[in-house]
Amino acid sequence: MIQTIANIDVDDLQKGIEFYTRGLNLRIGRRLGGTIVELLGASIPIFLLENAAGSSATAFPTVSRNYQRHWTPVHLDFVVDEIGHAVANARAAGAKLEGEVETHVWGGIARMSDPFGHGFCLLEFRGEGYDEIARNDS
C-alpha cells in the first residue's frame, strides 16, 4: 500500500498555520525543524513547507515559487459537513471564494484559494455523494 501525504508550500509558516488551523479546522501535529509543520485532522497528513517566494521550485532554475494566485492541475478538496459554515470560516481566515457555491445532485462545491495562491475546493456531499453521478451516468 502507498501512503499519501500532501505538501503545501507557503512563504510564511506562521501565516500558513493560522490559515489552515483557523480556516479549515486542522491541528498541529509535529514540527520538523523550523520550516515544516505537520497538520492533522484531514484524512491524510498535510505538511506546510516554508519556502521563500522566488526560490527555485524544481531542479530547473527557471521555475520559481510564486505566491500570487496560480493554477495547477493538482489541488486539494476538503469534504465538509456544512458548506456554508465552512466557506464562511475559510473566508474569515483569509481564503477567497472564486465564484458562487454550486449545488449539484451529489452535493455542493465552493472553489476557493488560500492566502498563498493555492486553489482548493470545499465539498459537501449529499445523498450518495459522487455515487449519485456514477448511478446517473449508467
Image (cartoon, rainbow, N blue to C red):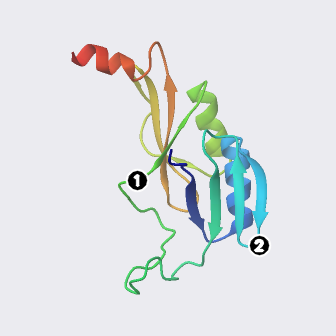
| Residue 45, position as x, y percentages in the image | 64, 49
Q: Residue shown at 39%/79% (left/top)?
A: 63
Going by the numbered disc 1, the residue's amino acid type is Val
Q: Is residue 96 above or below residue 48?
A: above
Residue 105 appears in the rendering: no
Q: CA distance from mark 2 to mark 1?
A: 27 Å
Could you say which is closer to the camera, residue 43 or residue 18? 43
Q: How many marks?
A: 2
Residue 74, numbered label: 1
Q: Residues within 10 Å of mark 1 (few under 14, many from 20)?
A: few
- Residue 103's image quarter? top left
Residue 24, numbered label: none
Q: Which circle's residue, 2 or 1, is located before the other in the chain?
A: 2
Could you say which is closer to the camera, residue 2 or residue 65? 2
Could you say which is closer to the camera, residue 45 or residue 108? 45
Q: Residue shown at 49%/57% (left/top)?
A: 118
Tell me the SS state at disc 2: loop
| Residue 128, position as x, y percentages in the image | 44, 15
Residue 33, numbered label: 2
Tell me the SS state at disc 1: loop
- Residue 90's image quarter? top right
Q: Residue shown at 40%/20% (left/top)?
A: 106
Q: Is residue 126 above or below residue 67?
A: above
